[in-house]
Amino acid sequence: MSFTKSYEPGEFEPNIYALWEQTGAFQPKKVVVDSDETDTDNCYSIVMPPPNANGNLHIGHGLTIALEDSLTRYYRLRGKSTWYIPGADHAGFETWVVYERALEKEGHTRFEFGRDELYARVWDFVEQQRGNMELQVRALGASCAWPDLTFTLDENVVSRVYSTFKKMWDDGMIYRGEKLVNFCPHHQTAFADIEVEHKDEDGHLWEIAYPIVGADVSDSLTEIIVSTTRPETIFGDVAVAVNPEDERYTDYIGRELQLPLTNRTVPIIADEHADPAYGTGAVKITPAHDFDDFEVGERHNLARIQVISENGLMLETAGSTYAGLSTTDCRKQVLKDLEDQGLLRGEKKITHSVAHCYKCDTVIEPMLKSQWFIDVKRLAAEAIKHLENNEIKFHPTNKKKVLINYLQNLKDWNISRQIPWGIAIPMFHQTETDEAPEWIFDPRTNLEKIEVGGVHYYRDEDTFDTWFSSSHWPIVCTNWLEGKENPYYPLNVMETGADILFAWVARMIMMGIYVTGEVPFREVYLHGLVLDAHGQKMSKSKGNVINPIELVTKYGSDAFRLGILRGRSAGMNQAFSENSVISGRNLCNKLWNVARFIQSMVDESHTDSLTALEIAANELDSTIVNEAAVQTGGELPYSTDNLGEDWICRELTAAKEQIEDDFANYRFSEAVETLYSVIWDKYADWFIESQKIYKNISLLKVTLETILKMLHPFAPFLTEAIWQSLSWTEGELIVQSWPPRLKFDPISAEQFENLITVVSEIRATLQCLPAPSKGQKWSLLFDNDSLVDDNQLLVMKLANVGSVLSCEGQPRGLRLALVGHELYLDVPQEVVTKYRDELEERILAVGRELDALNARMMNPNYVDKAPAHLVKQTRDGIAEKTALIDRLKAELTVIQ
RNA sequence: GGUUCCUUAGCUCAGUUGGCUAGAGCGCACGAUUCACAUUCGUGAGGUCACAAGUUCGAGCCUUGUAGGAACCACCA
């Protein structure tokens, strides 16, 4: 490859990715089945939360991949056998919704087909769409092991899910229960509690009178007034509950009420559920259509009368007048009829929260259905035990508490879904009605009817909740097998969105422990939502969705990765804007040009075909080279002769250690920040500039390689493209090893730091000169200043002064405010005079700083109790500021 | 109602066990310019760290309270 003038990511990204894939760089070095020894320490495993197989990636996937791939690449460079396992999700419900919509467009409905046919049709549909997602994951640079991609409907997933289900069935943890489920009348399926969205809505609270049967003059009440938001469910009423403490009603507990619009009577019961302070304090009980009432019904052993059908229409149980009406129409009719009978006593406007289908927004109807449930007591208790035992480290840490709190209140898990696109529940019943008493487990779900011991059994037509299979993800991806050592299980880390902590992370933990006896991962990193630039949640309806692939196309994959990681911390919902990607692109461009420049210097030095060791040998006498080689284990032959060279080695080494620390603590944003600063503010601005004079070729090579390796986890394409373009590098950067420390002389490094201070002061002073003199080139005079004397060329270049000269004991012009240096800008006297205001302001500013330091030292407690090094720092500060002020004041006198 | 989090520069955010003059990017102002990079370079302005009290020699950080905001869970007959 060769260097184009500017950074053009589109030119090389696809080729670079292809190179990595072809060389097998993404595959772990060690394969599970071949490993006898358990060298777990040297293996690193992480799974990709599987994106929807037939969808497109959104910004959250972009973040997830940036995070996971940075980790993967870092640990790969650290020499671990890394296994980043990609996945694709059949996305049961999501895909089903998309498919059903397509089906409806063709004028068909799901009811025209059998389950197996529908399954086959959706499979084809997904197959057609597939590939898009995988291309996008590649575009983002994910260094994942493609041959090991797991699809959530793969055979090994299904068989693992079946064996877990069987184990649970045998352990008595699975039961079939008639329970109220969250039912979407539009999608005709039940949802887990977690999939339901509660929204505050305006509604009405109606008060309806229920006459007391046989009320006479001895009764102070002749009717009980109940409050309800759903009068149409009146036909399902089986009782009216009052609070046992509520004195208004205690005398009437046990009496019968006439149920309006019917010829039934219902009893008055006492139950804590009735809140005396709410409405009239009396509540109608409809166990078949309300979650709370269901529980009241269980406590009092009440009947469940279903009056609404699965498609949202009133059933015969509602009486012939109302049967067949929609719930909305029925409500109107019921209210009208009640009013006609004089039983409607009030109507209040209220705000209450209503459950909605998270996909189509239809109001969820609590529906009485027979479904498969998992008794979660044991699963949750085990998970809590392992969590409290600190077996999983969370980032951010507080999520562990949140999770334990959730598990402590977990209700039984409904795993049945009435959609064909998913893993079939492997249960068969004896008769043709699905409410049969006897059920058997059998994995032959491809058959509608099986024969066991001469008896026919019929398949349950439901499929599993997606989360039931997803909870096996670490187990199935790493191919965990009972009794076999697997160095990749538990995963080193599980990285995913904080929004699915309960739905997914909690379930993986429970399932991992249940199946393998071990937690499925050692650490959890949760990222927050990516919000738009104004901190608003992205949504199609708001039109503020940012497409990651568009940004990749526009600015490059690396720019996107740097941009999305920047300023982001674990678990926080944070804003994101194109600006941060632009800034990432600028860094890429910067490094691109640095590399291009270094290559041009190498070319000019005619040593491009030589290794760094040979160059060093040419440049130096052999003893120094040998010494360098010994000190660095023979790897890093370079010398540091010139000012700035020790300094950059010191800065790069500090950055390297900072990044190591950041990775260990999942501080991605800080690591990126460190890289920006070291590459741009230090390497490019000071070191490269100084090398325009010195040209230490071997050191330029070593330091550039160090930077490429350090940046590779975050900007893989750019760094690899540079690596491939440099004349002296070999192989692929992706499989190189993490850089070692660079040796340096600390005194020399400090000297350069000193020079930076001098240069910065010169630059600042030049900018403060009055208008016509500002921006002109002036000479710098030094008097008895060895640092500047020894580095005249360097100072001239860096400070952008016309020349650097000794004043020969005759100082003139503007004296610089630098203690320990005698430096003058050779400007005419009138410019110096005009500078007076600046000088006075400077004296005041330094004075304020000095006052603050003095105040600190005046406090005897500070001197006594603060650590000695801080006290010393303060003392030194006072001395320095005092000297500076004296000097500035003297200068002021001279001007006058 | 429960759990958790947030409030730092115009904007978006860092700030690790309390310790130099609270940082970054973007934006803004001023200046530079053929010599790797205008996707550039230099300089600068801009902050009562939401508020109040406490602990401490010392608080953006710890404690308590107040105000405002967010997310999730539960519930609202």
Image (cartoon, coloured by chain):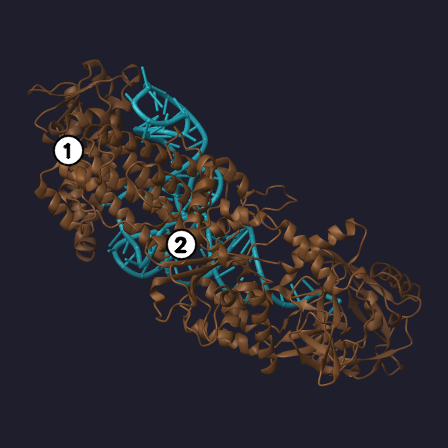
Chain colours: A brown, B cyan
- Which of the 4 quarters of the picture holds residue A207? bottom right
Residue B31 at x, y = what percent?
A: 34, 20
Q: Amino acid at mark 1?
A: Val
Query: What crowding class fits label 1: few (fewer than 14 Cα within 10 Å), some (14-19), or many (20 or more)?
Result: some
Residue at the image point whose x is 29% and y is 18% from the top? A775
The answer to whether residue A66 is left or right of residue A883 is right
To the question of a shared chain for discs 1 and 2, the answer is: yes
Vertical position of residue A71 compared to residue A295: above or below: above
Query: Which of the two discs, 1 and 2, labels the residue nearer the N terminus?
Result: 2
Residue A135 at x, y = what percent?
A: 54, 46
The answer to whether residue B62 is left or right of residue A379 is left
**Residue A819, label in figure:** 1
The chain carrying label 2 is A
Residue A613 visible, this angle: yes
Query: What crowding class fits label 2: few (fewer than 14 Cα within 10 Å), some (14-19), or many (20 or more)?
Result: many
Residue topped by disc 2: A71
Say if mark 1 contacts mark 2, CB within 8 Å. Answer: no
Residue A883 at x, y = what percent?
A: 14, 35
| Alpha-carbon span between mark 1 and mark 2 | 46 Å
Residue A141 at x, y = what percent?
A: 46, 47
The chain carrying label 1 is A
Q: For mark 1, give the secondary structure.
A: loop
Instruction: Please state which of the two labelled residues, at mark 1 or mark 2, is closer to the viewer.
Output: 2
Q: Amino acid at mark 2?
A: Leu
Image quadrant holding the C terminus of chain A, namely top left
